Amino acid sequence: MTPTGEALASFPAAVAVVRVLAGLASLVNALELLWLVLTDTRSGLQGREALKTQRGMVLRVPDGRGFAMILLLQCVAAVALIARADAIPAALLLVTTYLTAVRFRGNVNGGSDAMLFTILGGLTLALLDDAPMFWREAGLLYVAAQLVLSYLRAGIAKARHRAWWTGDALREFLALPAYGVPAGVWSSPPLLRAISTAVILFECASPLVFVHPNFCALFIAAAFVFHAMTALLFGLNRFLLAWTAALPSLWYAVHRAL
Amino acid sequence: MNPVALVGSRSTLARLLFPSWAFFDAPTSPPLLEIRQHIGIVAGGTWQSAFTAPTRRWWHLLFNPMGNQVLWYQTQIERFCASVANGVPGDIADDGGDAAEQHDDAMIVREIAERCIPPLWPRHGSPSWQYRIVVAWHSADSGSPIVVFESDVLA
């Protein structure tokens, strides 16, 4: 292993990288929603009557200007988290991320919000200086466990359906107007079948990272490319940011286990 | 306190704390929102996708607010489809929060559809329009999509 790789496998280094990347992901999330609030009053995210009622929610999250203040708080906390190792901004981001989820009747962008929430929870624990090392490590290992689970569960879900192996399912998703994928991308069935199969095998192989650090390094590189491609093709930038923030925890977990 | 309220809040928190990660688990294609204009009293125009493909720029790799907004719209449509599968949307029961949530789902999808009306559609002379949600996957053999929900003609 390279000296850099070895250095990144230490607990403080892994926490530092996760902290900076999670701060960046939280900052982007808040800025995106603020951008929508400030640039488009008809954005469909703020003035909706049905959202104002927030049925089924104990917690009342303010709308309009009040919600913008929550997003500003998230920006400040995100910058603070990037700047210094402190559990308070991480905990604040945990709260604002949850409030955003309540505001939008669940996740704004599916699993990426859930992954970021998972990271912030584990990170808050890992950044508690006075807490026993066992619990601090548990915070980081929890993120790693959820990360492996996220790939494995998604891989198994796809592997169970023939349409994913043939590439038909992928074509359906690529053709969804909401993703805005260029038409040429889904026009070749053999290419779709190959990509789809590769994704299933990649996701199902996630537990194998614990076999050897080299495999883990390879997996992390493949994961980054995978998320970068989904960000490019589907516009899923939040998936790229959230999962990239979680990847260093996997590197730490593998070295902790082996 | 309304017990339904507790369920709603807890389920949101539970989804964040213990996500299933089962992306694309359902063996169906994603639902599509379509809209059409009604010209005159009888004829309905051609159905067209409500969402137009967003223009992709290099910075969307990191910052993509409009793209994420459309994805949120898609999530709401999928949520509405689930509520249609579980009951009749729009009926608010006297004692049930579920029906109220279904009503909210329906209202939100209607608002999304309304916001997707192309600016070139004429807005004079009492134009009317309609929206529907279709699923294409299982109907590949028959060639026509399965209509999950179709609205009345709206003014």
Image (cartoon, coloured by chain):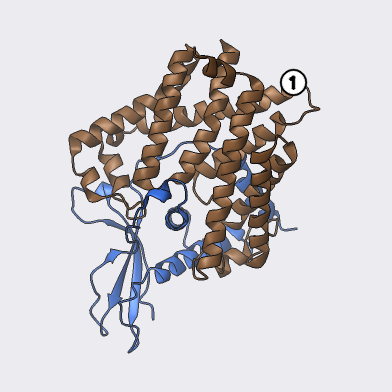
Chain colours: A brown, B blue
Q: Residue furthest right?
A: A130
- Identify the residue at horizontal 57%, vertical 70% (top origin): A49
The x, y position of residue B13, in whole percent, is 64, 45
The x, y position of residue B135, in whole percent, is 31, 53
Q: Is residue A13 left or right of residue B148?
A: right
Q: Is residue A30 left or right of residue B63?
A: right
Tell which of A208 and B12 is nearer to you. A208
Above or below, B101 relative to A17: below
Tell me the chain of label 1.
A
Which residue in the structure is indicated by mark 1? A133
Any part of residue B91 in sight = no
Count of picture labels: 1
- Identify the residue at horizontal 55%, vertical 27% (top origin): A248
Which of the image's four quarters has the C terminus of chain B? bottom left
The secondary structure type at the circle numbered 1 is: helix
The x, y position of residue A176, in whole percent, is 32, 51
Amino acid type assigned to the residue bearing label 1 in the image: Met
Label 1 Cα neighbours within 10 Å, binned few <14 / some 14-19 / many ≥20: few
Q: Residue furthest front?
A: A3
- Identify the residue at horizontal 57%, vertical 37% (top origin): A21
Q: Residue furthest bottom?
A: B125
Which of the image's four quarters has the N terminus of chain B? bottom right
The x, y position of residue A182, in whole percent, is 26, 50
Tell which of A121 and A78 is nearer to you. A78
Q: Quadrant of residue A200?
A: top left
Any part of residue A121 in sight = yes
